[in-house]
Structures are given as structure tokens and as C-alpha cells.
Image: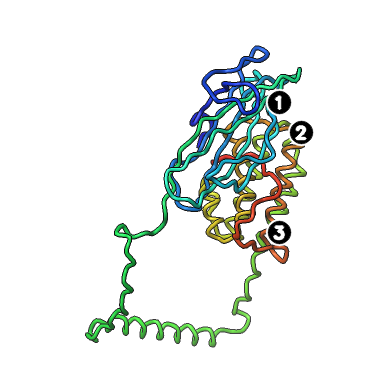
Amino acid sequence: MAWWGAGVALAGATGAGAPPGPGVWAAAGQDLRVAMDVDTTMIHLGDPVSVLLRVDHPADWSVEWADSLDVGPFEVLSYGVAPPNAAPGGDGAVSAAALILTSFELGELEIPVIEIPVVGPDGTVRTLFTDPYRIGVVSVGLDESGDIREIRGPLSIARNWWLLMPWLLLAAALAAGALYVHRRRRARPAAEISRPKVPPRPHHLVALEALDELERSALLERGEVKTWHVRVSEIVRTYVEGQLEVPALEMTTREVVAGLRNAALGSRITGTFHTFLARCDLVKFAKLRPDADASREVLGAARTLVELTSGPGRVPEADNGERPDEPAEAAGDGR
């Protein structure tokens, strides 16, 4: 999914608390702009909503992201900020932040205006405002009439024995086949009996070794930042398929997060996976180019996710509504 382009609002006032309005701030020969992208307009109760905020600004300006955001009636599951990166066209810089929201209220709800202050090199502060965004929140599995459905009685067993005849014949054939195989195995010499296969190596060890091999590679020294992030994402998605039985290699980031939520990992670990995959997506699809240190941080985050969800160190997390204490990195939605 392309993150940029939908739900766009432009800067319109100065100072904290100023009312939003249309317009663009010009600074150092470049406009200050903010764009907000939301991945859906309708969710079920408790489903996640991915929100991406992007600010285009001159390279010598900086975005003062808030430590926390109040977006009631929605709740913030995770909130992360990406380091500033050069704009794709080479003119200015791009700062981005990602939120994962949810709501346990029904109806047409609205993500309120979000204020984002931007500070110039001389201390000048300009405040940008997003547009409010409406999302419908619906319940799950309600009967249209609103009544409780009656419990169905047990199914009756067929009285016609002729209907069971094909199944009886099939059971007899299977029993005869099993007896034949058993006798064949007893008649074979002991040397011909195959030894049990060596069990496959644990998925977390395979993933950690692949991450170690990637760290020893020269991709970052050659400036192949995108290839680095693609490989890290593939290693983690392969691990998720083997360890957590979620077909992540053929899924979008949003589908992977839904699968992890169904695996009962809890909102903290699920949100951390979402932030990690989305950070890789920003490099693969949004053409952001983090530096080598930031790229190595992504690899460290991958190791942490593998260690948290595998082996004796795995810590199952009850989905009790806890929220992450530390901000996650910027998120996206891609492969």
C-alpha cells in the first residue's frame, strides 16, 4: 500500500493551540507540509488502525514530535518516530511517525486534529495541523434482528444402514492395507529398515544465524540499504511462517499483523512486529534511506523479536490492554 497521498492536510497557523486552516508555510525556500494516511475507513470493534504522519520540511528545520498523542475516542496501541531522512528528490528532508490505533466504541468516530510543531534553525516555530478523519466502528457477529438465536439440537444419526456401507467398506480397506504394510515391515531385514529422520533445526536458530550472516555482509558498506532491509524483512517473515505458523511471506504487513493477533501474542509483541515490518516497508516502498547505524538498529530489533517469541525465552503475553512503554519505529503496510 502506498502511504503517501491520502488524508492530506496542510499547515495553517502558528503557535501551539492555534486553530487549523488551509495554507502552506514557506520556510527557507521550501514549503512545510504535513500528510496523514489512514489504512481504512471501517473497522470491527478492537481492530487496529494504521496511521502514518509525514512532514516535508527544509533540511535545517526539525519536527518536535510529542511524547504522546491524545486521539480520543481512539486509543493508541503504539506510537513511533523515524529519524529524518533526505527527501526522495533531494530537496529538503522528510520526518515520519506511525501510530497504531483502536477503538472499543461503536459508531462513526473521528480521529481529531493532530498538531505538529516544526522548529527552524533560528528557533522559529510553525505548527502544522492534520485534517480530522472519520472511521466507522462496527460490532462483530450480531444478528440483524438483535435477538439471541436459539441453540440447535443434536443432529440425528442416519437410520438407513445402506448409507453407511461405503464407509464400512472404506474402513475395511484401510485395515487390510495397514495389515499388509505391517507384515511387509516384519519381513524386511533389519538393515533395510530406515532410521528415523533427524528432526529439523529450530526455526529461531535458523533465523538468528541468517541475521548473523547478514550482519557480516558488506551490504551497508556498499550503500545497498534497500537490499539490507528487504533481507531483514524476509528473514523475519520466514521465521514467522515456521515458528508462529503465519504465512507471512505471501502477506502484506497488515495481514501479517492480523495473523499474529490471532496467534494470541498480545498487543505489545504484535505492535512491535507491526512497527518492525512497517519500518522495513518505508525503505522498500517509500524510498527512505536511513544511515548505517539506523539500519543496524533494524537488525537488532529483528533479533529481539525472534528471541521474544521462541524457545525457553518466549514470554507469552496476555492481551490485557497494556500499552508499549517505549515508542516503536515508523510503520507502513507492504510486503
Residue 175 in the figure: left or right of residue 169: right
Mark 3 crowdedness (10 Å alpha carbons): few <14, some 14-19, many ≥20: some
Mark 2 crowdedness (10 Å alpha carbons): few <14, some 14-19, many ≥20: few
Residue at horizontal 71 percent and vertical 59 percent from the top: 205
**Mark 2 residue type:** Glu
Spatial separation of the CA atoms under disc 3 and disc 2: 26 Å
The residue that mark 3 highlights is 205
Residue 8 in the figure: left or right of residue 91: left
Q: Are marks 3 and 1 in contact (CB under 8 Å)?
A: no
Which residue is more in the foreground, 271 or 186? 271
Task: Give the x, y percent position of residue 99.
Answer: 59, 41
Color style of the picture: rainbow
Residue at horizontal 28 percent and vertical 82 percent from the top: 156
- Relative to 154, residue 70 above or below: above
Mark 1 crowdedness (10 Å alpha carbons): few <14, some 14-19, many ≥20: some
Which residue is more in the foreground, 302 or 184? 302
Residue 221: which numbered mark, if any?
Answer: 2
**Mark 1 residue type:** Ser
The residue that mark 1 highlights is 62
